[in-house]
């Protein structure tokens, strides 16, 4: 597994080729970073389809503006800042749409794949454990989703994606002290939310 410096150098070769219009080089960058970026977008938005659209838009934007990438941070950090900004914009659109659209009790229940599924009950212990695990993950995601956008971004980048404080500061244009402060408050908010959701901790 290459370290951060090797990864940055490796990305740098492809970025240079992209600046010359090499689409194959950009496809390699997409292949290397799409999974991580999708995870960031999903944690920000809580919806797989929205996350896919945001990541697609982010890569298109990155390709168009590759000349603006100065190389002071890693390509993944720069790309992540684009994903975060587009995710924030999508959240604003979703919230304004929800304020304008009335909800109906007759609306179908949506799932990640767009279908309402009914599965027969199983008495298998492993199925129960999986259900409990899924339920916990959904509660955690819901608590993350309750955070304000700026706090959510810091928590996702640090605790889920493992970005350094410096990388988070570069991606979000924040000082190290602000990053640490927001991370502390975000963790406290998620902890309090989970205490209420689980009735323990």
Image (spheres, grey):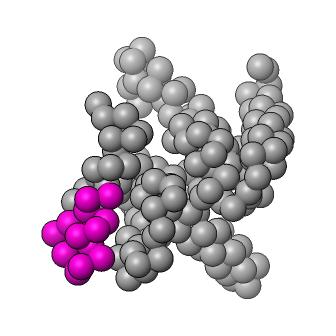
Q: Where does the image place residue 43, in percent across and percent down from the top left?
A: 56, 51
Is 95 located above or below residue 79 in the figure?
below
Q: Determine if residue 44 is in view.
A: yes
| Residue extending furthest toward the top | 125
User: Horizontal and vertical percent for residue 191?
Assistant: 77, 32
Q: Is residue 181 magenta?
A: no
Image quarter of the C terminus? top right
Q: Quadrant of the N terminus?
A: top left
Q: Can residue 60 be seen in this view?
A: no
User: Looking at the image, how many numbered discs can be counted on the residues?
Assistant: 0
Q: Position of residue 136 (x, y in %)?
A: 59, 32
Does residue 110 lie above or below 129 as drawn? below
The image shows residue 68, relative to residue 128, as above or below, that is below
Membership of 22 in magenta stretch: yes
In this image, 164 relative to 146: left or right? Answer: left
Which residue is painted at 41% across and 39% down in the image? 4
Q: Which of 181 and 189 is in front in this view?
A: 181
Q: Residue sitting at 28 percent across and 68 percent down?
A: 16
Residue at x 69%, y 75% (from the top left corner): 92
Where is residue 103, by image quadrant? bottom right
Say whether residue 82 is left or right of residue 130. Answer: right
Instruction: Return the residue nearer the eye: 36 or 91.
Output: 36
Residue at (35, 76) in percent of width and height: 63
In screen coordinates, is 187 left or right of 35? right
Main SS type for the magenta part?
Answer: helix
Q: What stretch is highlighted in magenta?
A: 12-25
């Amino acid at each position: 597994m290459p370290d951060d410096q090797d990864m940055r150098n490796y990305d740098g070769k492809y970025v240079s080729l992209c600046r010359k219009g090499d689409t194959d080089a950009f496809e390699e960058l997409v292949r290397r970073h799409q999974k991580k970026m999708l995870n960031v977008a999903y944690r920000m938005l809580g919806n797989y389809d929205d996350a896919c659209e945001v990541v697609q838009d982010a890569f298109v934007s990155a390709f168009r503006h590759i000349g603006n990438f100065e190389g002071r941070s890693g390509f993944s950090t720069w790309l992540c800042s684009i994903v975060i900004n587009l995710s924030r914009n999508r959240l604003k659109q979703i919230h304004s749409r929800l304020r304008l659209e009335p909800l109906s009790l007759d609306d179908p229940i949506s799932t990640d794949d767009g279908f309402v599924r009914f599965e027969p009950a199983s008495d298998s212990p492993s199925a129960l454990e999986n259900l409990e695990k899924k339920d916990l993950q959904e509660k955690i995601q819901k608590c993350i989703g309750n955070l304000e956008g700026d706090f959510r971004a810091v928590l996702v980048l640090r605790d889920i994606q493992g970005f350094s404080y410096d990388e988070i500061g570069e991606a979000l244009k924040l000082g190290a002290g602000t990053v640490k402060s927001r991370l502390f408050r975000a963790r406290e908010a998620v902890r309090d939310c989970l205490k209420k959701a689980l009735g323990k901790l």
